[in-house]
Structures are given as structure tokens and as C-alpha cells.
Amino acid sequence: MVTHVGVSHGGFRRAHAVFQEMAATPPDAFLWLLLLIAAARPVFVEPPVTHEMPVRDLLLAIDLSQSMSERDFIDSATGERLDRLSAVKRVVADFIAKRKSDRIGF
């Protein structure tokens, strides 16, 4: 007859009953896990819809030297003489007005 050291037959029966009880709990634990996931209200988020528009980054360099004060441009609409800087400002303002979606720096 083989005896187990430190384990009585009554202890073995109790251990076996606990093991059987634990074997019955995984479905319960799985159900609790499913309940927890449902309570978290997971939502599938679709990737964001993007609308790509052609955009250009432009950098304008304007000469601000003394030579820009020279009055050598004539406005074709009014016939008045303009200095170079004023003429550039008018042209650039018209250019910027036509480039609505572009990013422009000076």
C-alpha cells in the first residue's frame, strides 16, 4: 500500500472537489470576460475620409532696395506713373487672390 506523505485521504477528496469546481469555472470566467467587453462598448472606427486638394507652398522674395523707388512703370488702366514697389504690390496682390488654396510666404 502506497501512502502519500502529508496528504490524508480526506484532503485528497477536498483537493479533487476544488479541482472539479475550478474546471467548471472557465465558462463562467469566459462569460464574465464577454460581459466586460460588451460593457466597454467597443466600436469599429473606420479610417478617416480624406480629401486631398493640390496645394503648393510658395515663397515670394521681393526686392526692397532703393532701386524699387524708381518711378518707371506706367499703369495701363490709369496711365499714371508708379514706382517699382507699388507695381510689384499690385501684381502680387492679384497673384495671391488667384491662389486661394496655396500657402504663400514672403
Image (cartoon, rainbow, N blue to C red):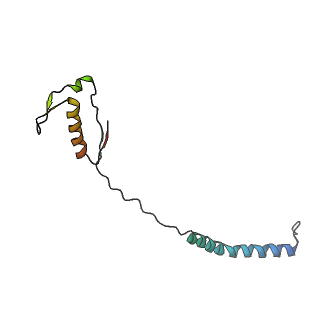
Q: Is residue 12 left or right of residue 76?
A: right
Image side of residue 62 versus residue 81, left or right: right
Residue at (28%, 27%) from the top-left corner? 64
Camera-side residue: 19 or 26? Answer: 26
Please state which of residues 15 and 37 is positioned toward the viewer in this rendering.
Answer: 37
Q: How many marks?
A: 0
Q: Residue at x 32, y 56 (%)?
A: 51
Identify which residue, 98 or 41, lies in the foreground.
98
Where, by quadrant of the figure, is residue 84 drawn? Answer: top left
The quadrant the C terminus occupies is: top left
- State the image quarter where residue 73 is shown: top left
Image quadrant for the N terminus? bottom right
Q: Residue 93: where, in percent of width, then height? A: 24, 41
User: In the rendering, at what x and y percent does residue 5 appear?
Assistant: 88, 65
Please say if 2 is above or below 97: below
Q: Is residue 45 left or right of residue 67?
A: right
- Please tell me which residue is depicted at 86% across the width and 76% down the height of the picture: 10
In the picture provided, is 67 more to the left or to the right than 41?
A: left
Give the residue displayed 78% in from the left and 76% down from the top. Answer: 17
Q: Quadrant of residue 40?
A: bottom right
Position above or below: 12 against 101: below
Q: Position of residue 71 (x, y in %)?
A: 17, 27
In the image, residue 96 lies at what x, y percent?
A: 25, 43
